[in-house]
Amino acid sequence: MQMQTFNYDNRIVKYFLYATIFWAIMAFTFGFLVATLKFFPELPDYIFGSDDPRIGGSIDGLAATNGMAGFGRLRMIHTTFAVFAFVGNGFFAGAYYSMQRLLKARMGSDIMSWTHFWSWQLFIVLSLVTFLLGFNTSKEYAEHEWPLDILIALSWVIFGVNMLKTIYKRRVRHLYVAIWFYLGTWVAVAMLHIFNNLEIPISWSLTAPKSYSLYAGVQDALVQWWYGHNAVAFVLTTPILGLMYYFVPKAANRPVFSYKLSIVHFWSLIFIYIWAGPHHLLYTSLPAWVQAVGTGFSIMLIAPSWGGMLNGLLTLRGAWDKVREEPVLKFFVVAITCYGMATFEGPLLATKTLNKIGHFTDWVPAHVHVGTLGWNGFILFGMIYWLIPRMFNTKLASNKMANAHFWIGTMGILFWVIPMYVAGWTQGLMWQQFNEDGTLKYGNFLQTVTILKDWLYPLRAFGGLLYLIGGLMMVVNVWKTVKTGKYVPNEAAEAPALAKISSARKKGEGAHTWLERMPTLMTVLSFVAVAIGGAVEIIPTIVVKSNVPTIASVTPYTALELEGRDLYIREGCNACHTQMIRPFRDEVKRYGEYSKPGEYVYHHPFLWGSQRSGPDLHRQGGKNPDAWHYKHMWDPRDTSPGSIMPRYPWLIANKLDRSNTVAKMETMVKLGVPYEEEDFDSITTSMDKQAIAIETSIFDADVKLKERYDREAKEKGEDFVPLRDREITALIAYLQRLGTDISTEQTETTSIIGSGAK
């Protein structure tokens, strides 16, 4: 048989590896920063200045940041860096290396490889810039505005086409299991990204992008968590499983434990995973049947997930003695173990019994970080330590340093997740406690916050710091290894040409064995497997009107309230506040009438949130006077001692930009929001009238504040911006509107275990 010579492209692998390492440090640094802000919210004051004499400087410095150092924006940056920059680049590095060797072929197109690399890095850099400037859609893991959504899609398509081109020119008949997971990942992420990010821009401006989700309220929540849960599934799980199936056998020098188990693992996992998204919305306004389906499939996920975990661990049979010495195998063992822990805990949290306690608490971030720090991080660390010496034809500079990284990283994970488990249980149980007279035992939300921020949140930040230190040790180790090695950008290889045979199934050939040499069919079947669940859950929820009963008293936001809502989105307030009151006795007692599906029909996008670092805001309207909100945004600790909310002086200093108000309302009309012609004719008048009423209310409550504005008006003259025209007024208008559309006189609730509810 004729042998063919060719070259592996190591250069693209090297660049993705370097990008992985760089963005890892960035992700860990921003993670440590946002963790610190959770117990030290005054940190920006110390950096930029404050009106607090104990801190010094001038509050003008903090106001001049325009929110760039705000928790909500920094959290978006951290998650994008962790998910798409660190894990994303790590997956691409491993995929480009393993695909070429598994298929015995150079990548289909060098041009496409490099276009993919630079477009992906451009997307990450632009994410940093746009989030700092406040351009985001609010959707968790999908906060990027429409130009970046297009860039992500194009980059992803380029990667997939290049992968398929490589597969079609392969010199190996059958596709190895890692390739199955790469293909499944590609089709699933493409589907999820496109459908979740369907939106209408208010304009085609690339410098100030703004759009509204095509979906509203309940439907938007379902589509988002169909995406959000499966971003974890198909960005943080299936591609990393593909890497596991390649690099664990390579590092252990052992074949995969079970080929048949690999088949069951792959197909059952990609089919079941896609159905599980609704478990993020239990006890919400989502239709009950969708919640039940999500819970059922979430519990089923234990089987394929643990099948994959066992397949990974049992691959090490006969090689456990190497684990004592080899840091690469140490990382892999703990990574696979963390995968098993996270995929067992996830289905448990999807049960209604535990979801009552865990949802909206720090239990959920603890669960997520077992996966991201343990599973994703450690698999990628092990892969880097295995790949770099081979890429540079040398030995790892220091096994001792790699082992130290392993132990420090492991301690970092423990210090991160254990305090957050305790924090989550503390929150979930304290919120539900009642006194004998039927009053809430911990009626002030801050009673839980103060407990967490004194001990548990600092411990979490310490864990993040340890993880970062481990990452920096890896940087030093990699640098020393690269320095002593000799890099070969085009590695010579040879393999026999692949003879052409009939695509028909041969006699005695197994069905899956035949499928493994039919890449187009396998890709199509993978798409069918991942598309069924979403279609069954989402289409009826959108099409069948009875799934979201309308409420006659619910009306669209006024122009000023709509602007205030966009400010709420800009600052990432939904990262800490929910707008979803579940039908529990304690939540209704604490916040007010539980939330109804029909209340959200004009909400593009939905803002239910996923964590309560602060109280729920769905019934916030009218609870506090306008002056309270003004003072709260100026300094939350003035109105709420012990609060961990950051300050927002720029909202009080900045003039509200009304230039896009008409375009925003016109876009809402396209989405079905019933603004009338008179609403457009009276925009300026209605906005001024509502703003003046808020300004008057604030000044009536605080005469000294009015005197300060009067002095400022005299000093600045024509440059003075009245309070009525500032951003804070629009935000207050929005907050005072929340939850006021319906009557809240009668309430039926679901009792909570241990609450004393009858």
Image: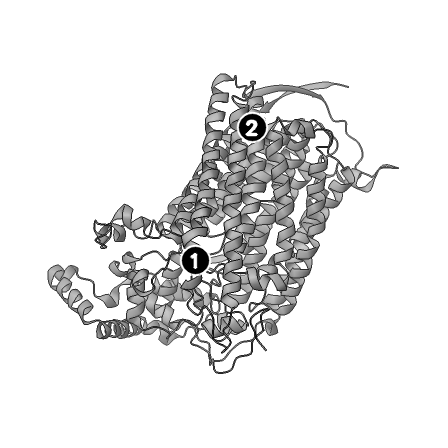
User: Which residue in the protein does label 1 denote?
Assistant: 451
SS at badge 2: helix
- Residue 37, horizontal then vertical, whole percent: 38, 50
In this rendering, would 151 be left or right of 502?
left
Q: Where is residue 758, by image quadrant?
A: bottom right
Counting labels gives 2
- Residue 566, horizontal then vertical, whole percent: 38, 61
- Residue 241, horizontal then vertical, whole percent: 64, 40
Q: Residue at x 49, y 63 (%)?
A: 608
Query: Separation of disc 1 and disc 2 at Cα?
Result: 40 Å
Which amino acid does the dot numbered 2 rest on? Tyr
In this rendering, would 72 be left or right of 181?
left
> Foreground: 443 or 351?
443
- Residue 493, horizontal then vertical, whole percent: 65, 20
User: Which residue in the protein does label 2 denote?
Assistant: 385
Q: Where is residue 633, by image quadrant?
A: bottom left
Residue 136 visible in the current orientation: no
Residue 378 visible in the current orientation: yes
Q: Residue at x 47, y 30 (%)?
A: 473
> Foreground: 145 or 425?
425
> Foreground: 255 or 90?
255
Q: Is residue 367 above or below residue 476?
A: below
Callout 1 crowding tier (Cα within 10 Å): few <14, some 14–19, many ≥20: some
Q: Residue at x 41, y 68 (%)?
A: 444
Mark 1 and mark 2 in contact? Answer it, CB < 8 Å. Answer: no
In this rendering, would 708 be left or right of 290?
left
SS at badge 1: helix
